[in-house]
Image: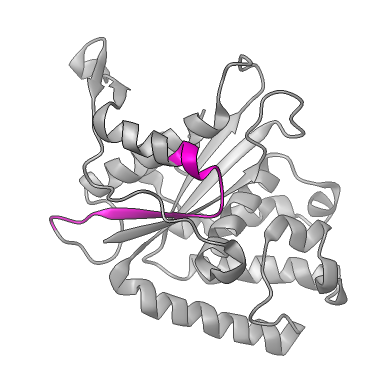
Amino acid sequence: MYLMYVDESGDPGMANSPTRWFILSGLVIHELRWISYLEELVAFRRMLKQQFGLRLRDEIHAAHFITHPGELAAIPKHHRLEILRRFADQLANMPDLSVINIVVDKHGKPQAYDPFAMAWRALIQRFENTLAHRNFPGPRHPDERGMLFPDRTDERKLRLLMRRMRTYNPVPNQATFGAGYRNLQLRNIIEDANHRDSAISYLIQAADLCAYLLYQQLTPSSYMRKKSGQNYFSRLRPILCRHAAPRDPDGIVRL
């Protein structure tokens, strides 16, 4: 069983949205690696507590961590940025992780376009396809399945989307199949999404970091540009799922 932890960066709205981009990042881990990788993250957090004073219960919500840290402002800003950099390196050194990234560029899209639905549909489809072709790293079984664990989001909308994709999921044909669509129903992702609170999930926080660093690569804040933080996403390259978009050098699905 593969578990995908998902978080977002940017705003999914079209009207009066403060952001051009909406990003979903799905961090995929096999159940047989779950315990050992969680233990690695706990050990990593203990190191951060010792070196920077970041408590194990403190949430690394990357955007707020830098710009609106609240009581975490007691940790100097350059140290908070260093924590994000080290967090990215920690994930990159966990070889059986895999990250699927979806980017929606809202610029030029019609007002009726739904970034939330389009991004989630693309993420779910890439998760399904990679499962079906057994392209995730780590332990393999011929009948592997997957489950979704997103951060709090529009639970009803996501649930209805997933249930619809199990019965009607039209996907445009590749050139070899001719024009038209195929109904590729979900067969490898089980259950509805199991929502988690990022404040109590290190793996959701890891997905949040991936989405934030990708957002900063696309449109860095002045502070991140000053500190070369727009380059931090590249530190995740060892674990990027290039099967999601083989023509993109980082496997990013761009909508």
Whether residue 148 is in magenta: the answer is yes
Residue at the image point whose x is 57% and y is 70% from the top: 200
- Asked if residue 98 can be seen in this view, the reply is yes
Name the residue nearer the viewer: 46 or 57.
Answer: 57
Residue at the image point whose x is 58% and y is 62% from the top: 198
The answer to whether residue 183 is left or right of residue 159 is left
Residue at the image point whose x is 42% and y is 56% from the top: 194
Picture quadrant where residue 162 is located: top left
Q: How many marks?
A: 0
In the rendered image, the residue lying farthest to the top is 179
The relative height of residue 42 versus residue 8 in the rendered view (above or below) is below
Residue at the image point whose x is 66% and y is 44% from the top: 215
In the rendered image, the residue lying farthest to the front is 156
The relative height of residue 193 versus residue 73 in the rendered view (above or below) is above
Name the residue nearer the viewer: 115 or 80.
Answer: 115
Magenta stretch bounds = 142-158
Q: Residue 202: where, in percent of width, then height?
A: 54, 70
- Asked if residue 248 can be seen in this view, the reply is no
Whether residue 161 is in magenta: the answer is no
Q: Residue 24: where, in percent of width, then height?
A: 54, 44
Name the residue nearer the viewer: 142 or 148.
Answer: 148
Q: Residue 193: where, in percent of width, then height?
A: 40, 50
